[in-house]
Each structure stands twice: as C-alpha cells, then as structure tokens.
Image (cartoon, rainbow, N blue to C red):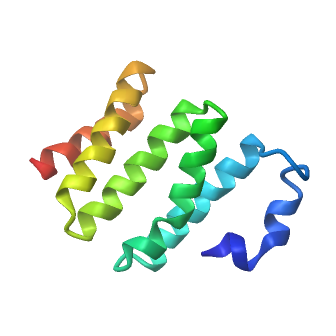
Amino acid sequence: MIAPEHPHIMGGLRGPDTHSVGEASVLHLVGGIDAAEHAGDVQLASGGFGQALALAEALEMRPLEARCRLGLGALHRRANQPTMARMQVEQAAALFRAMDMSFWLAPAERLLDELR
C-alpha cells in the first residue's frame, strides 16, 4: 500500500491530531491503485479502501463512504467472496439511492445483478 510506505504524502493533508477530507479522498485513490495492483490479494488490496471508509464514516462523508463500499464489493467479488461482496455493494447502493447519486448507483446495481 502506498500510504505507509510514503508517509510524506499524508503529512500535508492533516494536522497532528486531525483527519481531513483530503486525507480520506487520497486514501480512496490509494485503494483504487492497490485494487489494480493487488487484485488477487483482497487483504492487501482493500487497505486503502478500508482506511478511507473508516475516515469517511468518521467525517460523515457519505458519498465517499458509498464509493469505498463499492470498491470493496468489487474486490470481494473478484476474490470469489460473494457474501462479503453483496453486503458491501448493497450498502453502497442504498447510500447512492438515498443521496440520489444515479451516476454511481448504476454500476452498483449492475454489480448486484452479477452477484445474484
């Protein structure tokens, strides 16, 4: 994962005791990179998405929370873990629906159809 290996990336995004919106967004991007580079290893590939999800929930960033869950769901699907995938994608779809985010809802619903 990029963030631990390159802590200076995160240093400019937050103060000593706070987490910023920028940090959560960067971690989501790291999750996407990790997912592409380590698709066969869900544990390793999900690190960035998991960290971004935790921050998104803490900072009440619902759109980012939903996108993290969608990314995690896709990872679990590729790892042949349909139950975990379905759980994450259902939560993502519910958030997208509640926020009227049709652009992101469409791929979530397609992924749910594949998981059924």
Compared with 75, 17 (above or below) is above
- The spot of residue 12 in percent (x, y) is 89, 57
> The N terminus lies in which quarter of the figure?
bottom right
The answer to whether 73 appears left or right of 11 in the picture is: left
Front position in the image: 25 or 91: 91
User: How many marks do you count on the picture?
Assistant: 0
Q: Write down the quadrant of residue 72 in the picture.
A: bottom left
Q: Quadrant of residue 110?
A: top left
Residue occupying the point 57% across, 47% down: 54
Compared to residue 113, the image places residue 99 above or below, namely above
Q: Residue visible at 63% across and 37% down?
A: 58
What residue lies at 29% left-to-right and 62% top-to-bottom? 76
Residue pictured at 60% horizontal, 59% vertical: 29
x, y percentage for residue 109?
24, 38
- Residue 56 position, x and y percent, is 60, 40
Please, is residue 71 above or below residue 87 in the view?
Answer: below
